[in-house]
Image (cartoon, rainbow, N blue to C red):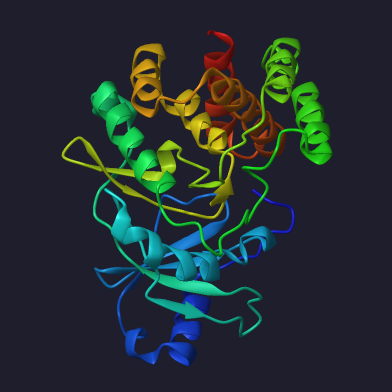
Amino acid sequence: MHEDQVDVDGGLVRRLLAEQMPDWAGLPLTPVAEQGTDHALFRLGTGLVVRMPVIGWADGQAALEAEWLPRLAPHLPLEVSVPQALGDPGLGYPFRWSVHPWLTGDRLDPASVVAVELARDLAGFVRALRSCDTTGAGRFGSRGGPLSDPGRDRDTRASLEAARGLVDADAGLSVWEAGRAAAAWNGPPTWFHGDLTAGNLLTRDGRLCAVLDWGPCGVGDPAVELHAAYQLFEPAARAVFRRELRDDDATWLRARAWAVSIAAMEIAYYRGSRPEFESRSIRAIEQVLSE
């Protein structure tokens, strides 16, 4: 998936556990088939999961989640997987890693849930997260800052051009420019998860129950969180999501721009390596352009 990806297998994980967390070293260890983009996952016993970064940009996520999720979790209506232990680099493996509770549930399949209920549940989570105390927090990644950032502008334009032929790049660029021209966020920075996509959401009995993978989280412009509306929802459910959050038109102009930017960069990066990511990002841009 990545040119500079680090290979991780069960043998390495077992040796690291034996060296750093011997109390857990004897538990059964099973690779998790459903992998993300930046971590290899291994189920440990029945109640734990080991998360191993495989790319440099994910190196700080274990410490980030260990610092902030214990503070956020008590205020959120959905479960989050608060790290139980942090591991250090070792045995040739270069990154910090973590052990989390295994949360029961199914990866979100939009076809298996009632879309308007999902929209209300997710909006409730977003509202609760926005209300959390931001003292000491910052923008930890590339999302949530002002759309005027020159680097973001350059990369978005280049990614849209690279996606020409898969999406309407000119229309996408118009959405991006409209977001940049919209009134900037002038309120206090608020918490955002930053990647509320289907792979990071769990359901139980057809209802949203948990939010995973907080790597892009931080505090900043709340518009960035709304890009999920174009990843997850058709127009009717998206309208419910929008009504529940009551954000103004300028925020949604910036949200549409974020949706185009994030999706275009994913198309450019994962083209040829993760076709399912390419497809979902093409669909997200199509949803934006359909409005």
Left or right of residue 191, residue 271 in this image: right
Whether residue 36 is visible: yes
Q: Residue at x 52, y 72 (%)?
A: 97
- Tell me which corner region of the image, top left, top right, bottom left or bottom right, holds residue 186: top right
Q: Position of residue 282 (x, y in %)?
A: 59, 22
Whether residue 31 is visible: no
* Above or below: residue 237 compared with residue 186: above
Q: Nearer the viewer, residue 3 or 260?
A: 260
- Tell me which corner region of the image, top left, top right, bottom left or bottom right, holds residue 159: top right
* Above or below: residue 72 compared with residue 20: above
- Tell me which corner region of the image, top left, top right, bottom left or bottom right, holds residue 197: top left
Q: Farthest residue to the left: give it.
A: 205
* Above or below: residue 67 compared with residue 172: below
Q: Position of residue 265 (x, y in %)?
A: 69, 34
Q: Nearer the viewer, residue 173 or 267?
A: 173
Q: Residue at x 73, y 58 (%)?
A: 4
Q: Nearer the viewer, residue 48 or 156?
A: 156
Q: Position of residue 274 (x, y in %)?
A: 59, 38
Q: Residue at x 40, y 22 (%)?
A: 242
Left or right of residue 66, residue 111 in this image: left
Left or right of residue 156, residue 270 in this image: left
Left or right of residue 105, residue 178 in this image: right
Q: Farthest residue to the top: give it.
A: 290
Q: Position of residue 176 (x, y in %)?
A: 71, 21
The number of discs equals: 0
* Above or below: residue 158 compared with residue 19: above
